[in-house]
Image: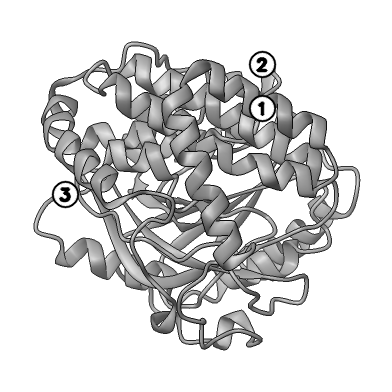
Amino acid sequence: MKSSGPLVSVVVPAFNAEATLARTLASVLRQSHQTLELLVVDDGSTDRTAQIAADLAQADPRLRVIRKENGGVASARNAALAEARGNYIAWLDADDLWHPDKLARQLACLAASGELPAFVYSGYRMIDADDVIIPAHRPLSDLSGDTLCLQMATNFFSNVSSVLTRTSFVRALGGHDIRLRGWGVEGAEDLLMQLRLMRFGPALCCREALVGYRMHQANMSRAYSRAAASNLRVLRMVAREYPAVPAWVRDLACARVVGFVPLIALAGSPIAALRLFLELMQGQPAATAAMGLRVLMHGLRHGRGAGGAVDPALGQDFASADPRTAIWAAPILLSPSHERRLRDADQQVGRALRRHVLSDVSVPKGIERRRHP
């Protein structure tokens, strides 16, 4: 097939991912947009991860394998960033999937955009171990535009596998932040990248479910607790880096972490759940109480599901389902008044972001683009 269109560097960090890696990589290599390079980073795996990637690389020269000692997801993504040749970069977790038209449809959204966005993201559908679509915990939300404050208060897409952005933007930020792992709160590197990218322009949404976001049941209590701690650290970092963000937005953003409290409790750690709730109440009591009430009411109405309309693709294989039929709605857990205030704040913050230089981002060694023959 003749290549055309811009080169996209696709980055897949992989650690002991033998169970899902082949399907993940196949979803990239089968993209209708064929002009891509696939950089698989074996992050010190002890299973067949490296061999699976190497076998596929022999069959398709667009795939290259980078091997390194285990250092975490941020370090792995940065190793690929140093090797990336594409004008655009997209990340995919080693257990997620892409719809065959994911890159093509996002590039079409970029081409049709009236202004240069910071990134384009898509919707996702949750899938099980067999790639079958399962009920989502919340509906998808289109938060296009200058929406840093709204993003902080909602974490609206949860997963970096949906993002396409310019490689130059990511290099200017120094790649993914490796410090979270050192602090023991690895997990929200995706959220931090998403929020930092907003300095370059508005967000753009491709309103289709183009990512299969795989859910796992093992060790969920530890995962939820660490995710909560990681979110809090990232939100406080971003609030310091962007002084234009009002204090009440920071408080509301931290308060939405209360949504992890019932998840931690249901996963079998009620003491950890209580400890998180008390921490949030001490830091931002009014916002936490209001957000906690909304979490409770949402849970009573909808349980752990998204509520509202039922996704017509439930039970279907992800790759064959129509991505245009996914359910989109306003962000859950925000009152209409909070959403209006956040959008008003974003009008002011968006202008400030264009002039603001991040105060706490340095370029680690090895992130600068390496020269290729």
Q: In which quarter of the image is the C terminus?
A: top left
Eye-nearest disc, 2 or 3: 2
SS for tag 2? loop
Residue contact at pointers 2 and 1, CB within 8 angstroms:
no
Residue 292, given in percent of the width and then of the height, sits at 53, 40
Q: Residue at x 81, y 53 (%)?
A: 49
Q: Can residue 209 be seen in this view?
A: yes
State which quarter of the image contains the N terminus: bottom left
Residue placed at 64% from the left, 71% from the top?
Answer: 26
- Disc 1: which residue: 276
Describe the element under mark 3 as helix, strand or loop. loop
Q: Nearer the viewer, residue 166 or 136?
A: 136
Amino acid under label 2?
Trp
Whether residue 88 is visible here, answered yes or no, is no
Quarter of the figure with residue 56: bottom right
Q: x%, y% of residue 139? A: 46, 66
Q: Distance between the residues labelled 2 and 1?
A: 18 Å
Circle 3: residue type: Leu
**Numbered label attached to residue 183:** 2
Residue under label 3: 116
Q: Are marks 1 and 3 in contact (CB under 8 Å)?
A: no
**Badge 1 density bin: few <14, some 14–19, many ≥20, Cα 10 Å:** many
Tell me, yes or no, whether the two marked residues, 2 and 3, touch with CB atoms within 8 Å.
no
Q: Position of residue 324 (x, y in %)?
A: 38, 82
Q: Position of 160 compared to 207: left or right?
A: right
